[in-house]
Amino acid sequence: MKLAIFDDLRLGVVVDGGVVDVTGALPWRHDPDGLTATWWRCLCRDFQDLRPSLQAALDSGLPVIPLGEVRLRPSVLNPSKIIAAASNYRAHVDEMHGVQQRTLGRVESWMMDFDVFLKSPSSIVGPGDDIVLPADVLAAGHEIHHESELVVVVGSGGKDIPESAALEHVFGYTVGLDITVRSAADRSRRKSYDSFSPLGPWVTTSEEAGSPDDFDIELTCNGEVRQHVNTSALLVSVPRIVSYASGVMTLWPGDVIFTGAPPGVGPIEPGDVLSASISKIGGMMLNVRKAN
Ligand code: MN
């Protein structure tokens, strides 16, 4: 299934021609308050039990609402954390030597090795929202880069999940942008400004998406292809990322994991239009603007 959050935090199943509102099939009262809504994380945890009810609602003849008539929201709601992988495509690691020389005047060799770090959940926005470039960062002349990534949504969480069982803990996949200031500051700050984690347009569940080692990721900027990669090129595979991250911190249902930037990262500027897509998931467009 492709599951979308839309309008006042309703749940939709994406079908040909639009979205079917299946909010009424959930066992919880609809909560439109983004601060208190916890149903999404419960859905991530309990999806296998709830799927028959969602499928029954889908089969009951509910109307298909054209996508143009709804407002798609971020594809996840209230994750406890955003985990992100660094240095996970060889060609990106190679290009970062040049990027760091240009933006830092040196190469931080420790950043060339795979690891995970955290971004603030408050940096999440959805399809059609703007990526807002902070005025002080622009004034300082720092480059702000796009990183277009496959994002894992955690289903049943856990600690010390073995690699062999990791995919059983994955609820699904969504498209993410890991917007990044290139400067000499902590990675969590450079990547946690508001709007620096666009997620959308919906989540494709694991059973529908299949193996995560054969997705095509593409990012265009103003129509020009900037990043294009297949996830078979990941240095650390999705199961290994899940296992590694869960060895550090307990994964909670609904947590999201960015799997790493493909090669082709580059600066974005006010007025740019980004289009990010992943095969078997979908795509979204975002406008880039300066903060008011
Ligand atoms: Mn990244």
Image (cartoon, rainbow, N blue to C red):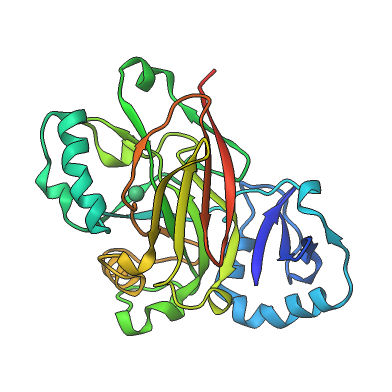
Q: Give the left or right position of residue 256, taking residue 47 as reference.
A: left
Question: What residue do we see at 30% from left, 24% from top?
Answer: 142
Q: How many marks?
A: 0
**Residue 162 can be seen, yes or no:** no
Q: Is residue 28 above or below residue 91?
A: below
At x 64%, y 67%, the residue is: 2
Tell me which corner region of the image, top left, top right, bottom left or bottom right, holds residue 58: bottom right
Instruction: In the rendered view, tell whether residue 165 sits above or below residue 29.
Output: below
Inspect this view and state whether residue 175 appears.
yes
Viewed as shown, does residue 120 lie left or right of 280? left
Picture quarter with the N terminus:
bottom right
Which residue appears farthest toward the top when viewing the image? 139
Kindly identify the residue that appears in the image at 46 percent across and 53 percent down: 218
Residue 166 appears at what percent x and percent y?
38, 78
Determine the image quadrant of residue 286: top right
In the rendered image, the vertical position of residue 61 relative to residue 86, given as above or below = below
Locate the C terminus and report the quarter of the image it occupies.
top right
Q: Could you tell whether 177 is left or right of 145 in the image?
A: right
Which residue is more in the foreground, 76 or 284? Answer: 284
Q: Position of residue 185 (x, y in %)?
A: 23, 32
**Front-lying residue, 18 or 169:** 18
Relative to 230, 114 lies left or right? left
Q: Position of residue 232 (x, y in %)?
A: 34, 69
Q: Residue at x 18, y 49 (%)?
A: 94
Q: Position of residue 158 (x, y in %)?
A: 39, 73
